């Protein structure tokens, strides 16, 4: 079976201020990287608009109303120091969700082995009741709930290799033993959460990495902490919050990962998923703010997904 690439045609509907690191050019870099001949075997689909009311699976009932009230009729409004919303942001958020839901369905039905969704805005910092950290809706959390609700998954695992801790995803699932959340992240760094001592109800596994460290330290942390915990959880689906800001060129962090590190990690996660859940993997783009670092990281990630398929 093949790997699915879900693209988001309206990625530039979510407008951020000039110079903001989370900008439409990120998706252009990803699309350019994945246009090369070596990705010709990808199955490619455009993201439909998803039903944003499904956000209520992980956010309060009035969450979308609050976002809609914050959204300006024109221009850009600020939610917090780093997080902005424009007139088209909820349309972009709807197609980002639609991408995840389409990928989930294609993987669940066996049409493809695994999938990568090239979408924005990211989602893993959005907590149960608070958008933050460039994130409006916690897309991957909604996809995890849909895997349970629509496809009967008893256990869903989320592995997050963004350089920043996914405080939102952890916040949403920290009391739910049916969802496993693991994160590797630079420590200390924004948002200041994710100590290794916090384990939720036994379903949270954090691996902290010191500034300046690279692939060797990352591999050791996954081998010692995250992979054993993931295998013990034995998920029915594996979701990946795929951030590429651990790249050595990224301006917002200080880790030293190289493209081969993203490839190794993806390969190992797919190998585990093959044994535990028939290779069912859905990966969604989170961070990554250096154009070249993002492009090479995504290329390495998707090549490894294709090799697993």
Image: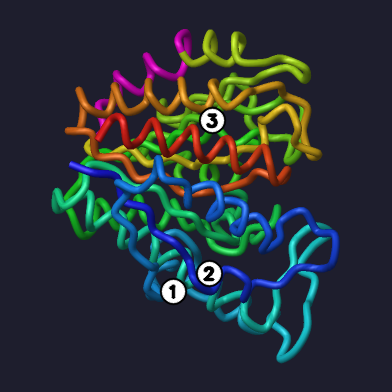
Q: Residue at x 75, y 68 (%)?
A: 16
Question: Under tag 3, what secondary structure?
Answer: strand
Instruction: Give the magenta part as a residue range.
Output: 223-235
Quick one: label 2 or label 3, which is nearer the N terminus?
2
Which quarter of the image is occupied by the N terminus? top left
Q: Is residue 229 magenta?
A: yes
Q: Nearer the viewer, mark 1 or mark 2?
A: 2
Q: Residue at x 61, y 38 (%)?
A: 244
User: Can you give x and y, in whole percent of width and height, for residue 309 in the image?
Assistant: 24, 35
Quick one: label 1 or label 2, which is nearer the N terminus?
1
| Residue designated by label 3 | 183
| Mark 1 in CB contact with mark 3 (< 8 angstroms) | no
Mark 2 Cα-neighbour bin, 10 Å: few <14, some 14–19, many ≥20: many
The single residue placed furthest to the bottom in the displayed view is 73
Q: Is residue 79 magenta?
A: no
Decide: is 297 above or below 67. Answer: above
| Residue designated by label 1 | 52
Residue 304 seen in the figure:
yes
| Residue designated by label 2 | 93
| C-alpha distance separating marks 1 and 3 | 26 Å
Question: Under tag 1, what secondary structure?
Answer: helix
Q: Residue at x 32, y 36 (%)?
A: 306
């Amino acid at each position: 079976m093949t790997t699915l690439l879900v693209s988001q045609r309206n990625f530039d509907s979510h407008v951020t201020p000039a110079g903001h690191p989370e900008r439409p050019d990120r998706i252009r870099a990803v699309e350019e990287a994945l246009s090369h001949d070596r990705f010709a075997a990808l199955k490619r689909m455009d993201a439909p608009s998803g039903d944003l009311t499904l956000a209520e699976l992980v956010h309060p009932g009035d969450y979308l109303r609050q976002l809609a009230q914050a959204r300006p009729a024109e221009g850009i409004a600020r939610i917090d120091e780093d997080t902005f919303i424009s007139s088209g942001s909820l349309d972009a958020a709807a197609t980002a969700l639609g991408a995840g839901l389409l990928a989930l369905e294609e993987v669940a039905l066996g049409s493809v082995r695994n999938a990568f969704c090239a979408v924005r805005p990211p989602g893993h910092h959005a907590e149960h009741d608070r958008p933050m950290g460039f994130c409006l809706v916690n897309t991957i959390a909604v996809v995890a709930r849909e895997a349970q609700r629509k496809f009967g998954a008893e256990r869903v695992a989320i592995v997050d290799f963004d350089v920043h801790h996914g405080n939102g995803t952890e916040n949403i699932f920290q009391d739910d033993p049916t969802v496993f959340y693991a994160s590797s992240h630079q420590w200390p760094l924004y948002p200041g959460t994710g100590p290794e001592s916090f384990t939720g109800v036994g379903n949270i596994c954090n691996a902290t990495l010191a500034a300046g460290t690279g692939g060797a330290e990352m591999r050791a942390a996954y081998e010692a902490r995250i992979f054993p915990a993931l295998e013990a959880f034995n998920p029915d689906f594996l979701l990946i919050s795929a951030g590429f800001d651990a790249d050595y060129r990224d301006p917002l962090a200080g880790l030293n990962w190289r493209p081969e590190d993203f490839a190794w990690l993806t390969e190992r996660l797919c190998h585990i998923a093959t044994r535990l859940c028939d290779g069912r993997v859905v990966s969604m783009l989170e961070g990554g703010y250096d154009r070249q670092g993002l492009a090479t990281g995504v290329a390495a990630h998707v090549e490894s997904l294709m090799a697993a398929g």
